[in-house]
Amino acid sequence: MYLTYEEYKSFGGTLDETAFNEMEFEARNLIDWYTFNRLQNQDKYPEAVKRCIFKLIRLKLEQLQALSISDNDTSIFTSKSGTNSGIAIQSQSNDGVSVSYNTISAAEALEGTKSEMINTIKNYLGGVYNKAGLKLTYRGMYPGEEALYFDANNEVI
């Protein structure tokens, strides 16, 4: 676990412990994917990693809230009160009093949140190294890392 429940609460988190554990697991898996598991088996995790997990959980919560408000893939996202506050007006006419709002599908919302999550990982962990001195977001393979992915016959494990 990269972020404990107590640390999450100290950052201002509001989830109960069960929901937090599930969300932390998802955020940790996403970070592991984009860092090639370079954080696994560490004794201590940098502050940037903890803050990144917290931010990813917040983004996921916002995504879930937006999707629960929408009716289907073609609906306009509205606030809980049912008003269109915060939604950009696409077109407006004065004489016939007609207003059209930008629409966003659930798939578009998911894609936007996904790219925001990836950018969060890049921004928070871009200059962070693990205990072995390996840069977490380096897209190449460090010497010695091949043992994690290939066997003695250079076959993928």
Image: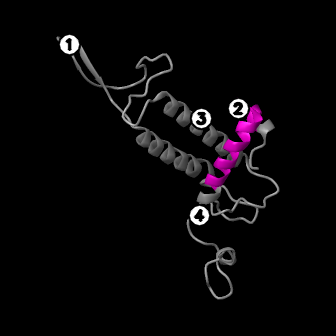
Q: Quadrant of residue 126?
A: bottom right
Look at label 2 and name its amino acid: Leu
Look at label 3 and name its amino acid: Leu
Query: Which of these two is toward me, 151 or 116?
Result: 151
Q: Quadrant of residue 96?
A: top left
Q: Which badge, 1 or 4, is on the more N-terminal residue?
A: 1
| Position in image of residue 19 (x %, y %) | 70, 37
Q: Residue furthest bottom?
A: 153
- On the picture, is 84 further left or further right than 157? left
Res 94 label: 1
Residues tagged 1 and 3 counted as in contact (Cβ below 8 A): no
Label 3 residue SS = helix
In the picture of the structure, the residue carrying the numbered disc 2 is: 15
Res 61 label: 3
User: What is the CA distance from the residue labelled 1 to the residue labelled 3?
Assistant: 38 Å
Label 2 residue SS = loop
In the picture of the structure, the residue carrying the numbered disc 4 is: 138
Q: Which badge, 1 or 2, is on the more N-terminal residue?
A: 2
